[in-house]
Amino acid sequence: MPIYEYACQDCQHNVELLIRSDEKPACPHCQSVCLQRKLSLFAAPASGAGNKKSATEFPAGGCGRPQCGTLGCQGIG
């Protein structure tokens, strides 16, 4: 069962939902079924503890977090 990211068109929450093929997703915040599936980026596990990057080492928008927007992690204070 895949996990999908959705944006609720009614309450504007972004949610991740585990969806079976026969289920219609609903927002857990407002129960609306007016959800738009978002394009998600996958995350690969890093090998080794010293392999972490600081926020400034990612290119603009490179971390994939929606809150970073077009400025990337550099825009978060």
Image (cartoon, rainbow, N blue to C red):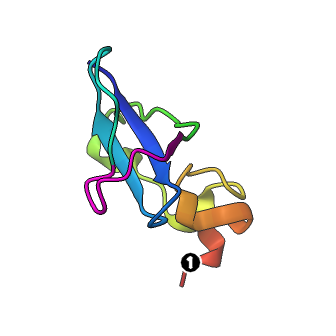
Is residue 8 placed above or below 45 in the rendered structure?
A: below
What is the quadrant of residue 72 in the picture? bottom right
Q: Is residue 1 magenta?
A: no
Is residue 4 placed above or below 6 in the rendered structure?
A: above
Residue at position x 33%, y 32% in the image: 47
- What segment is highlighted magenta in the picture? 27-36
Q: Is residue 74 left or right of residue 25?
A: right
Q: Quadrant of the N terminus?
A: top left
Q: Nearer the viewer, residue 56 or 77?
A: 77
Residue at position x 29%, y 27% in the image: 19
Q: Nearer the viewer, residue 30 or 54?
A: 30
Q: Nearer the viewer, residue 34 or 42?
A: 34
Q: What residue sits right under mark 1 in the picture?
A: 76
Q: Is residue 58 visible?
A: yes
What is the quadrant of residue 36 in the picture? top right
Is residue 7 placed above or below 4 in the rendered structure?
A: below
Q: Secondary structure at mark 1?
A: loop
Q: Is residue 36 left or right of residue 30?
A: right
Residue at position x 53%, y 57% in the image: 9
Residue type (three-letter) at the residue carrying disc 1 = Ile
Q: Position of residue 75 (x, y in %)?
A: 65, 76
Q: How would you classify the magenta stretch by its main secondary structure?
A: loop
